Image: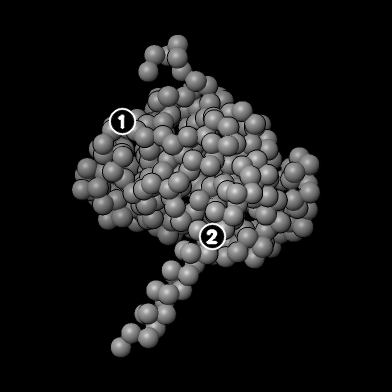
Amino acid sequence: MNSSNMQPFAFAIATHSGDLRYCRILCASIRHFYPHLPIRLLCDGAPDVRPLAGLGDIEPFEPRQPQLRSLRGLLTKLRVLALVEHYEHVLFLDADTVLTGPILQLPWGGCEALVDAEGFRFLPSAAKLDYIAQHCFEPEQMQVFDPSFDCRRMLAFNSGAFFLKRGSLGVAACLEVLQRLDFEPRRLFRYGDQGLLNYLFNRAAQQGRLRLRHQGFMLIPGPDPWHLLDFSDLTARRVLGRGYRRCYLLHYTTPNRHRSLRAHRFGDVLAAFEAAYYRQVGTRTRLRDGIGHWQRQLGQWSLRLRRFVAP
């Protein structure tokens, strides 16, 4: 794309038919803080995202590279490497996140990549390799795969949200790694996308091709240290009133992805943005989505029942 036609910024969201409800909530939260910025969807399969267009400037993105178009599941988010060719900066978000504040106030403009590695940065040195092994890849296997990569210099981050600048990570580098693994990244990388993105970002940083910066901006309820902290001030009223300042992003479904909204620790925030979404797109869409939700639930229950009674 000609640089004169380059757009400055876009949000990118990975989604599929099973988490469209989360995607709607996230898009509504983005529109609460940023009514007009483009949102591009990285779709696994063919989820019906047409109603989301009612929030304005939301559409699917298809990369031109057939190898990226063929990626499914968690690897769908790797399409962001192609999307960022069309924008100066992109903020990637997992569908099961929600904005709790004006996240673009972060100092993302002066670096090639901005990540949240809060859970890793404060670990004692002796525990960091164990963390990498648990969340990214086995350091011993990485030494065989890429002897030049230094796990001791690595900044491990959660790949559910990150800023990326155009030209900082190329599609070719990603495809080269995938081809070496016969497009089966789980042979080396934990969760597929998590380990692979950590490797790509950190390898580029170690080679001097990318300035990788960290700032804590994301809350993941449940694991330490979050369950030890008091977040009673994180309420729908404060978030909608733009009065919450302790984090900008909530990554809420891990590890209980299929709980009801109200069952989540901050369910009132999620319910408030879902209500805001349906106020925009109309009650007919809400009725259709509700019917579809219960049809999927009944299908899952029926499948479980058949497995239970099968001889």
CA gap, disc 2 and disc 1: 35 Å
Seen at 37% across and 31% down, the residue is 82
Residue at image mark 2: 291
Q: Secondary structure at mark 1?
A: loop
Q: Residue at x 54, y 36 (%)?
A: 53
Residue at 54 percent of width and 30 percent of height = 57
Residue 278 badge:
none
**Residue 250: where, in percent of width, then height?**
62, 50
Q: Is residue 127 left or right of residue 46?
A: right
Q: Amino acid at mark 2?
A: Ile
Residue, disc 1: 64
Q: Is residue 7 left or right of residue 65?
A: right
Q: Is residue 54 visible?
A: yes
Q: Which residue is situated farthest in the bottom direction here? A: 311
Residue 47: x and y in percent read 43, 48
Mark 2 or 1 closer to N-term? 1
Near mark 1 (Cα within 10 A), the count class, few <14, some 14-19 or many ≥20, is few
Secondary structure beneath dot 2 equals: helix
Question: Of all residues shown, which one is farthest toward the top?
Answer: 4
CB atoms at circles 2 and 1 under 8 Å apart? no
Q: Nearer the viewer, mark 2 or mark 1?
A: 2
The residue type indicated by label 1 comes to Arg
Q: Can the viewer see residue 132?
A: no
| Image x and y of residue 64, in percent | 31, 30
